[in-house]
Amino acid sequence: MTLPRSTAFLPFQNDWHPADIIAALRKKGTSLAALSRQSGLSSSTLANALSRPWAKGEMLISKAIGVPAEDIWPSRYYDADRNLINRLMRVREARKSSGNLGI
């Protein structure tokens, strides 16, 4: 039986709430929009990482607050058995299923 992809079924800490991520950035003296602009992105672009997996955005946010991305979003990095998810493989599989092979 396969469990749904929900943090409620994970046997460890849930993902941080988006408000907690924003608060952590504020405590470091920045904001999501400012971090986006400093990274050469549109001011609202990094907000995507709060609601959907995006490795680059997760890395930028995690570096800014000094917490590993896998601690902020464990559901994106570990499966239900606490095994590290090969995210590169997930990207490739998603591209294959959508027909976008990056060619």
Image: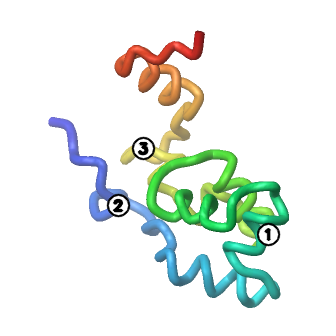
What kind of element bears circle 1?
helix
Mark nearer the viewer, 3 or 1: 1
Q: Are marks 3 and 2 in contact (CB under 8 Å)?
A: no
Position of residue 69 relative to residue 94, above or below, is below
Residue denoted by label 1: 64
Sequence-earlier tag: 3 or 2: 2
Mark 1–mark 2 distance (CA, rounded to whole Å): 24 Å
Residue shown at 63%/87% (left/top)? 23
Residue reaching furthest front? 42
Q: Nearer the viewer, residue 29 or 5?
A: 29
Alpha-carbon distance for marks 3 and 2? 10 Å
Name the residue beneath numbered marker 3. Answer: 79
Q: Residues within 10 Å of mark 2 (few under 14, many from 20)?
A: some
Instruction: Give percent across and percent down for residue 48.
Output: 53, 58
Q: Name the spot of residue 56 as percent of width and height, x first.
A: 69, 47
Residue 11 is left or right of residue 54, and the answer is: left
Amino acid residing under circle 1:
Ala
Q: Which residue is mark 2?
A: 7
Which residue is at 46% across, 18% downward?
Answer: 100
